[in-house]
Amino acid sequence: AYFYDEPSHTFSEYLLVPGYTGPDCIPDNVSLKTPLVKYRRGEEPAISLNIPMVSAIMQAVSNDKMAVALAKEGGISFIYGSQSIESQAAMVKRVKNYKAGFVTSDSNLSAESTLADVLALKQATGHSTMAVTEGGQPNGKLLGIVTGRDYRVSRMRPETKVVDFMTPYEKLITAPKSVTLKEANDIIWDHKLNALPIVDENQNLLYFVFRKDYESRKSNPNELLDDKKRYMVGAGINTRDYAERIPALVDAGVDVLCIDSSEGYTEWQRQTIKWVRDNYGDSVKIGAGNVVDGEGFRFLAEAGADFVKIGIGGGSICITRETKGIGRGQATATIDVARERDKYFEETGIYVPICSDGGIVYDYHMTLALAMGSDFMMLGRYFSRFDESPTRKIMINGTYMKEYWGEGSARARNWQRYDLGGDKKLSFVEGVDSYVPYAGSLKDNVALSLSKMKHTMCNCGALTIPELQKKAKITLVSATSIVEGGAHDVLLKESTPNQNQ
Ligand code: MZP
């Protein structure tokens, strides 16, 4: 057997030591742009993220709603693969058909819907703005708009008061009576309008289309759009049904795939990547993993992976280490893989981004992961706490919780992620079903996390992620000094809200 000289460590065992902070080194000047897929020296990656965060390939985390919310902030979601090919492709399609800040058509609403119907649907879907179209079709004639603010069904008629509200708009856009939702959305986008009155040839108001959050969106330069109107989205795949699943996802417009497995150093992953290259060349981007050492990284890089994911057993809901005794401390794994990634780059001129997946508990863990060489991070628990995750919000002992379960739990039954074959009856769980404290909206939480990340980077004298990786000074800490890092030797007056968890 091979014995490693050092024990493996995780993020909580490290700290960053500040470097010189120059006068221009302020959070506003920090760029968190980072490559998502491999590129050659001197070239630009085909896809970059504007923030180094992607959401985990999990039922409890990444559906179409999460994907839109995260893309708005500059990251990307990988829609979970432990569902039928049809429903996964439909989720991808919904993200691609979603127009930023635009009204959505909902097939459950029609011209006959009552306010109660709308409220029930709003509750069930969490959509803030809905359009009522004929037949509920995206291309159906637009009949009315329901806004998030007060959920009024505003079926516009020329005599409605809304006309007064419209008057600040100098020009009313004349549209034919048969304007469709799609056309209305295009007009909104092209004219950068906050709201669009649609009138008939006599300037009588027919419809009024809102973009409620236009102003705030305009101020977010991070938004991850691949052409000018559509959000980017990823999807998880497995090494079994890829010949059927990948074409369906590609048809749906997926931007990037990732082989979702607890153990990526396998022939099955090599074959899956080869199948993609044989059938699509480099036009389909595919990440692979997970691995925890340089050897595993090199295997997947040589197999042609567009990025490589790191982490076995560190996920908050993961019991793989207890069940099978495999894994490695997440920080050590990240450091080891990053070294090999740099070596591979030196040798081949090809930079293969790496992603630290799982085990991020505090926001500073993200900054540490980046400093240790990670290009971006995949997070499950973090995103599961937000309004946008697909799970139920439940009140437990006076506190709101969200459900969060592992892909290897009996609830998800994503055996393809773990199974190496054999009798199905002998499948065993590697994950748990749990609750996490509800934390509010993705937008607010991500903004706070990024603010901390940028501040820390400035403390290290870095304005970009590559600069952080070059300049960071990282120290292991003793168990005693970890105690010193929290509030100690004082009696806390009241429980301070923990913004990290
Ligand atoms: P975390 O962000 O919750 O700590 O970890 C999320 C990661 O845990 C996922 O991206 C995935 O790699 C891993 N995962 C998902 N399900 C399981 C499981 O059931 C798991 N064991 O380990």
Image (tube, rainbow, N blue to C red):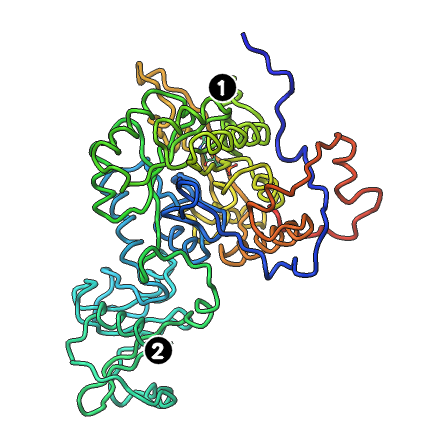
Mark 2 C-beta closer than 8 Å to ligand 1? no
Amino acid type, residue under disc 2 in the picture: Ala
Classify mark 1: residues with Cα within 10 Å, few (<14), some (14-19) or many (20+): few
Q: Nearer the viewer, mark 1 or mark 2?
A: 2
Secondary structure at badge 1 equals: helix
Which residue is painted at 50% across and 19% down in the image?
A: 326
The quarter of the rendered structure image containing the C terminus is top right
Front-most of residues 299 and 480: 299
Disc 1 from disc 2: Cα separation: 55 Å
Residue denoted by label 2: 195
Mark 1 C-beta closer than 8 Å to ligand 1? no
Secondary structure at badge 2 equals: strand
In this picture, residue 49 sits left or right of residue 416? right
Tell which circle, 1 or 2, labels the residue nearer the N-terminal end: 2
The reply to whether residue 1 is in sight is yes
x then y, percent, for residue 355: 48, 37
In this picture, residue 473 sits left or right of residue 76? right
Which residue is painted at 79% across and 49% down in the image?
A: 492
